[in-house]
Image (tube, rainbow, N blue to C red):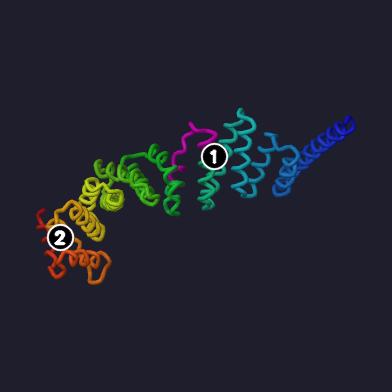
Amino acid sequence: MKLARLSALALVLACTRTAANHEELGDRFYAQGQYPDALAEYRLGLKGNPTSAPLHAKTASAAAHVNDYEGAVSEYRALANEDRSRSEEAADGIERVLRAALSAGERGIAAQAVGALRQIAPGRPLGRYVRLVAVDAVDRGDAQDALTLLPAAIAVAGDGKTADSLLYLYGAAGVRAQSCSTAVPAFETVLRRQREPAVLDRAREGVSQCALVEGQLALQHGQPAAAEDWFRRATAPGAPIDVARAAFLGLGDVQLALGDVAAAMDSYQQALVGGVAGDTIAQRAREKLNALGRADTPPPPPPPPPSPGR
């Protein structure tokens, strides 16, 4: 037993010496500007001493020098985890990596860097970085990253128009994530404040699209009153024509379920307005009208265009 303990101790000491040797050799390479070799030695050293904060710091710096931004972020995060007193140093290093990653167009890694900063230095202002990364997440279609990052970007927006543009994107990310409970309040805030005209029409479209989805869900769950409210919101001015037509189709189903056959037929007729022969909404509306004995009723004429003075 005593021999076994001595052998284990000898192995630990050997690993420690090996880690120290790799660190010393890495330092020599680093001083000579041979950063790839330094990085390789530091990583070997970490295998023997994975909790060494100094080694994590050196590995992070060497990784940044060879444009291994992902590795650098990981090592700076490890530095903060191993030694909380060096969190500010780690955050400074991550911010440098973030700037370099953005300059290199590495937006995905920049997003990782922002996430690491939020974890180890939550009070640090992220300014334009979080905005760039958040907008990139939207462009990439990464709804979850966008929903995580956009609130911080909105909070540091320099003016109301920028804030509302980002708030619109937050709503759009909510739609993509199939979370209308997130999207609708965002869109409605944009519409209420009227600070960025460029996104108002799209915000109205977003509200109507979500209203259609929510109305369909309420109808499926046997909640006709709630479904009717949502469908009426989906037919409000500014709604895309096909969204409004689909909403009239749903509204007809609600009215039919409530026993108001005349109102249901009128809604089904509205679903035909603006369609083309054979489109899905028109086909379903005609099927429903046919079931009610009114398949040959012509659709009502479209509403007249607004006068030039209005």
Q: Main secondary structure of the magenta part?
A: helix
In this view of the protein, which residue sits in the foreground, 247 or 206? 247
Residue at x 33% of width, y 44% of height: 181
Query: Which image quarter: residue 50?
Result: top right
Say whether residue 166 is left or right of residue 195.
right
Numbered mark located on residue 116 in the image: 1
Residue at x 33% of width, y 47% of height: 180
Q: Residue 185's spot in the image, x, y percent?
A: 30, 42
Q: Earlier in the sequence, mark 1 or mark 2?
A: 1
Query: Which image quarter: residue 150?
Result: top left
Say whether residue 108 is left or right of residue 290.
right
Numbered mark located on residue 254 in the image: none
Does the magenta run of residues contain 249? no
- Quarter of the picture holding the N terminus: top right
Numbered mark located on residue 265 in the image: 2
In this view of the protein, which residue sits in the foreground, 127 or 50? 50
In the structure shown, which secondary structural element does the residue marked by tag 2 occupy? helix
**Image depth: mark 1 or mark 2 in front:** 2
6 versus 192 height, above or below: above
In this view of the protein, which residue sits in the foreground, 221 or 249? 221
Q: Which amino acid, mark 1?
A: Ala
Tell me the magenta residue range.
Answer: 116-132
Say whether residue 82 is left or right of residue 160.
right
102 versus 9 height, above or below: below
Q: Residues within 10 Å of mark 1 (few under 14, many from 20)?
A: many
Q: Is residue 199 visible?
A: no
Q: Which amino acid, mark 2?
A: Met
